[in-house]
Amino acid sequence: MNPAGTTIAIIGAGFCGTALAVQLLRRPPVLPLKVVLINRSGLMARGVAYGTRVENHVLNVPAARMGVLPGEDEGFLQFAQRHDPRMTGGSFASRRLYGDYLETLLAEAAINAPAGCHFRAMVGDVERIRPEAGGGELWLSNGDRLQADQVVLALGHYAPSDPPVPEPQRGFYCSPRYVRDPWRPDALWGVKPGQPVLLVGSGLTMLDIVLDLRARGHQAPIHALSRRGLMPLAHRELEAAPVYDAALPQRMLAQPGARHYLRSLRAAVAAAEAQDGDWRDVIGALRGPTPELWRALPVAERLRFMRHLRPYWEVHRHRCAPELGRRLEAERASGGLQLIAGRVCGYDERPDGVGVLLRRRGASDVERLDVAAVINCSGPEADTRRSREPLLASLRSDGLAVPDELGLGLSIDPQNYALVDARGISSPWLRYVGPFLRARDWEATAVPELRQHVTRLAESLRSDLARPVEERLRYIL
């Protein structure tokens, strides 16, 4: 340890980075300690999800389950009720309010940190991390360097990949009529309210962008295109406690395979509905056991699940708030939102718009859809093998990080969240927490799951930093 104390650098200030910083500041693993939270934008504790200012962008999880700290599951609910006494545990609060909550927790943790524990919020873009003196040296795009004893990557999702089209057609992706990243602050400024648009993707990102466009006064038709034409399903109103089939996971594990899992789920849904139950409770029964179910699948079965079942799982598992579900149905009923099952084949851009060439699912003919703009709503890019982010690219090239074999995330030590390097060795100083844990656990995107991962990582840091330095650095020495 540095005589001046231990430095823990956290890269990424969304939910995971903020929650980890709060836990470390409240219960420092060692003293003296400096916690440095680094974000490429100045919005600490927001990330992409909670940086929105659109009130219609609400959480996809009820308020009572959105607490950050262990033992304080209703922490967010209590915070929200101070702003709106009508808020209940079943309410779906705005994501902006949740960002306020994270911001408040971080500020309070920094102010109330014990003596010898210091916090620094740093705006910068980390492009490379090099092993250095038992820890890591962070290289920032502005030329700054930062030494840290422990480095935690709390990286979230990146911008979507462009829809695959033949190479001659890819020039359209440089056009101002194409919005690659709908979460850029200025992404929708050029979309005129009286002209039709195409959203590529029909999931939760599509729903957010539809709401955003309507809030901006967009009155023209909105088309949404995806391979299967599936849209988000809604949570039910929480009028009664869910009823879970506790034996379902074990019945599924009796024969690990995508087809058996599907048959078991269908049988459980049929049994629930025969007793006036709700299919959502069947899905809910799998929330905790999902990592075990995923790890039990052979690689070939994981691939089969991803190829054939993943889109259906996503719309049933990751649902929207009931009110947003009603708005989505109203949009479709009025013709304001038109859903197409198919794929993009190419583009014909003209001065007054773009003709999107598409093929509907099951059809052989290509048809043309004329719109003013194309917005990529296909969801965040989670394949670290394809990511063009400088930091991930350098970690790969330096052998410090290895993408998993399915392209879902990174190879992570299940015991302590350490990155596993190209030699198959767990790093003693470089760790990860965030959605790239999907490679290991499949479900690692919602707050209830991520909260548990952050808590386990914080405990691992406390345990590891209590060990003698020589033992921790045996990997390097």
Image: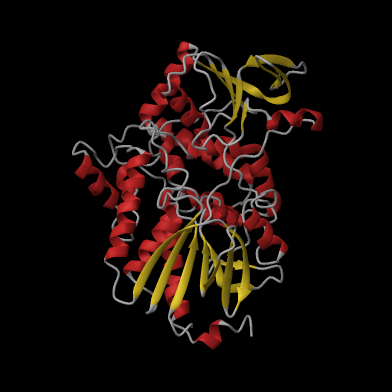
| Whether residue 43 is situated above or below residue 7 in the rendered picture | above
Of 351 and 13, the residue lying toward us: 351
Relative side of 347 to 428, left or right: right
Using residue 473 as the reference point, say whether residue 368 is left or right of it: right
Q: Residue at x 45, y 27 (%)?
A: 212
Residue in view at x 47 percent, y 24 percent: 213
In this view, 128 is above or below 49: below
User: Residue 353 vs residue 192: left or right?
Assistant: right
Q: Nearer the viewer, residue 158 or 326?
A: 158
Viewer-proximal residue among 236 and 11: 11
Q: Is residue 160 above or below residue 336?
A: below
Decide if residue 62 is in sight here.
no
Q: Residue at x 30, y 53 (%)?
A: 104
- Residue 164 can be seen in this image: yes
Residue 235 locus on image (x, y percent): 39, 34
Residue at point 48%, 50% (across, down): 41
Q: Residue furthest front?
A: 143
What kind of colouring is applied to the model shown?
secondary structure
Q: Dividing the picture into quarters, in which one does residue 374 lie?
A: top right
**For the C terminus, which image quadrant?**
bottom right
Coordinates of residue 360 in the picture (x, y in percent): 69, 20
Q: Position of residue 402 (x, y in %)?
A: 68, 61
Q: Residue 369 sits in which quadrant? A: top right
Residue 85: image location, x then y, percent: 18, 39
Q: Quick check: 445 left or right of 76? A: right
Q: How many marks?
A: 0
